[in-house]
Amino acid sequence: MKYFISILCFSVFSFVQSQNCSSTFSGEVHDFHDGTPIINATIFIENLNKYTTTDVNGQFSINDLCNDVIKIEVSHLACETKKMDVTIDGDTYLEINLEHHIEALSEVEVKSVNTSKLTKTTQETILKSETIDRFSSLNLGDALKQISGVSSINTGSTIVKPVINGLHSSRIIVMTNGVRLQDQEWGIEHAPNIDLNTAGSINVIKGANALAYGGDAIGGVIVVKPSKISLKDSLYGKTIITGHSNGRGYNLNSSLTKTYKKGWYLGAQASLKRFGDFEAPDYSLTNTGLNTKGFSVNGGFKTFEKGFNISYSYLDNEIGILRSSHIGNVNDLVNAINSPEPSVIENFSYDINAPKQEVTHQIFKTEFYKRFKKFGRVDIQYDYQNNHRYEYDIRVGDDKDKPAVDLTLKTHTLKTNVKLDSKSNVTYQFGVNASFQNNFADPTTGVRRLIPDYDKYDLGTYVISSLRLNNDINLDFGLRYDFNQIDAKKFYRTSSWEERGYDTDFPDLVIDDLGTQLLVNPVLNYHNVSASAGISYQLNDSSDFIFNYGLSNRAPNASELFSDGLHHSAARIELGDLRIKQETSNRVSGTYNYKNEALTLNIEAFYNHISDYIFIEPIGTTQTIRGAFPVWSYNQTNASLYGLDLTANYSFNNQWYINNKSSFIKGRDLTRNDALIDMPSTKTVNSIGYTNKKWLNLNTELQSELVFRQNDYPNNNFEVYNPTTDQMVLVDVSTTPPTYHLLHLQSNITLNISEKTNLNIGLNITNIFNTDYRENLNRSRYFADDLARNIMLQLQLNY
Amino acid sequence: MKNLKQLSLILLAAIAFVSCSNDDDATDNPVPVNEEEVITTLTATLTPVGGGTEITLQKQDSDGDGPDDAVITVSSPLAIGTTYNVSLELLNETESPAESINEEIEEEDDEHQFFYTATNDVATFAYVDFDGDGNPLGLEFTLTTADVASTGNITIELQHLPNKSAEGVSDGDSTNAGGETDVMAIFPIVVE
């Protein structure tokens, strides 16, 4: 009864109130970041069509409101518009926080056109989704070559490792969906395990200036980001189907994302890729097929203030390696180099036989962030990666189907990042990364372990500050410290242990003596300091400059420390060295950007001095039952790399344009005063393009790619005895292939099928004239020509 | 506050995860790999047709791809104008007892072939054993020395996956054989 009365009382009370319609709704509007009042913000009551604006103190008030739920919209120039429901119950007071950072805003609001740069004072380039989609059926390395100064080091055409300003493998960090890829990146024939179709945009930062990602990226950082999620009720996706004439390849990729206005989202993506034997202009490249399966799911909640994300991705790559590149000894290598054709040429097949590799990579990630008023943003992330790598060699008897390499690399990473952005002209960022990695080499392969079992611990911490001095000048400073420990257990042949002099230098490491083998337990610690400083200066509306400096240290990887055995396709014995220290890079760079209506120009120059640069060089030969083999050992020297990258675009009108991308680089071994091995050739790509919106949005571009012969290379040639001819013969592993020129065509049209659906049809022809060529940085160049003409047809449905 | 709690919960879970996996993996030592396809030793036993002292030619590399060089031994000079029946034995001596590789080669005789060459015409060779297709294998062969006193090198090679039907290959010429070399042994020979 009491309840009834009180309910009644309340009802009467509210009835009276609503009849009055004399409530006042007042409040204050503040900047979310620093709490300052926002002047001139509009408060609009949608259902009553009333509005007011805030005064100099950010305060507002609206009179004569009935007690009811009202819908308000708070907006301000350059701010995120905020919609909310407010219950008016008598005089009501409300404090409203608006977000006024446009950049951060675009991150939340804009879908798939998120092409914001990650840094302001580094040499950073962005690949947008349109470019990435074109490479849907290819791989990361191929797509990145669109950037001037980025090249690739290949094994055939399917194992493509990106090279940034002459540096690759462990000197490059690859981030995918916020996770640092840990996939045995040390080997030349280990390509990054990333499905390009998971990328919405890719940022490439040259040099080690993005310290939040790591301190050891002497070459640079590649940041692969998924498409951005929009905060609206929507269901969208795309499907890409591609067919290739060369390799008779096909590719299918499909993705679907559901988003909700409130911030929830769920997305899934799957791709399938299959190629058979590729072709050079004159013959089939036997056993070069590819079979890729991948999928990813991604879900979470996202608003400006807080959010979380859980994602999982799976990628399985089965990659054939040119049959003829599997050789027995140096004499076989001489025959391969001197023979105009590969030794094994068979008819086309989709079969992938040994030699081949099969790699599965799984990433699980969970991430959480929250923004705090007048403070900034806190991110915390945990990820787990599992990389399982099989390599199959040509073997005999019972071992035929057994892998020769069976490595499982597991990595756990926990990281936090705090960004203080409450002041509009200066932001601070600091964070901690901790990771644990375990490598397990399965001994049942019947082949000595290429990489030993090890545990690796990394702990890193960094501070970065970004200062906006005025509208024209930005300054960045960063400092990072990393500790790495690698705790390995490795079997050495007693003879190898002694030959390397380890018995005198590291006698205490031996934990077990098996007679011909020793089990040793090296525990190696590295302390690395990295620093970065940069300035960007906007000279006028059309010109700006960027200068920066980066100091970075990289600890040696497992391959540089522990390699110990025969590398089949190179016909050489490769040895690591436990004494190797970290290498230190000092890099300075300058960038000039010019932009007017017709011309855009970007010139990037760099000088990178690397002390104790880790590289591999021949040190002698050894006699085995298979014959004599050259022995290559990891060593350290002082090196310098310098170069110039140019990108220019000139539009004659809104239909015709020409474009040039050129890069020039030199690498010197300063101690020996010799060239560095494996430096990219000077390259220039010129294109002419035509676009016409009226002709079904036609884009077409003819591209001329000119790659000059690399004239600077160290001479690592040697002689070997040929018993058939009773003569010494030269093993020419150094001489570089000649200059080559290729012509490519790209074109596409877009058909609008319905309001929200369009179909993009693309036709690309690479190597139009079917030119014979060999690329210096392709390991298969000793054995066969590079790819013949390829015609690719691609259908992309966006819905 | 609630969020901070959630945050610390995630942190805790992650740390627990990391430390657990840490414990699993670091406990015991790895087991040594039992190398399966290594050939450490090639021995050619030469028996003179019509009787006489056996001669052995051996190449032995007990540490495989390790730094120790292979050791070549020739037990004695060969006699002028003599035909020897030669049989080859291949061993993996990293195992104990040593494993004979001959069996594997015989089982896959169509995928293997030995080739012999001599410098300074110190000897000529003829295949004795053949695979199922009638192509030479070469674990057994005859060696006939020169009619004059001379010195030179005899090379014995084992090719895996040669193209046996290529020109000259069945006659013992490896030029067009392709394949990859599993064994290459060069013996300095004196004929007297």
Image (spheres, helix red, strand yellow):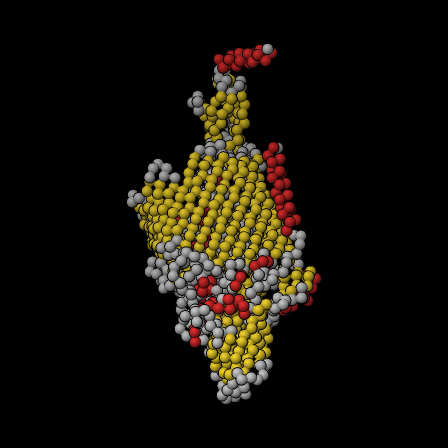
**Place of residue A347 in the rendered image (x, y in percent of width and height, measured from the top left):** 38, 61
Q: Residue furthest right?
A: A508
Which residue shows up at 51% across the image and 22% down it? A87
Residue B72 visible somewhere in the drawing: yes
Q: Which image quadrant: the N terminus of chain B?
A: top right
Q: Which residue occupies the foreground of this view, A23 or B10?
A: B10
Q: Is residue A313 above or below residue A13?
A: below
Q: Position of residue A36 (x, y in %)?
A: 54, 32
- Vertical side of A542 occupied by A520: above or below: below
Task: Tell me if residue A147 can be seen.
Answer: no
Q: Is residue B109 left or right of residue A745?
A: right
The one nearer the camera, A334 or A36, is A334
Q: Residue furthest bottom?
A: B148
Residue depicted at x 63% and y 67%: B96
Q: How many marks?
A: 0
Residue A290: image x %, image y %? 44, 55
Image quadrant assignment for residue A708: bottom left
Relative to B79, is A90 above or below?
above
In the picture as drawn, the residue positioned furthest to the front comes out as: B50
Q: Residue at x 62, y 41 (%)?
A: B13
Left or right: where A760 falls relative to A116: left
Q: Residue furthest left?
A: A695
Residue A521, percent from left and from top: 66, 59
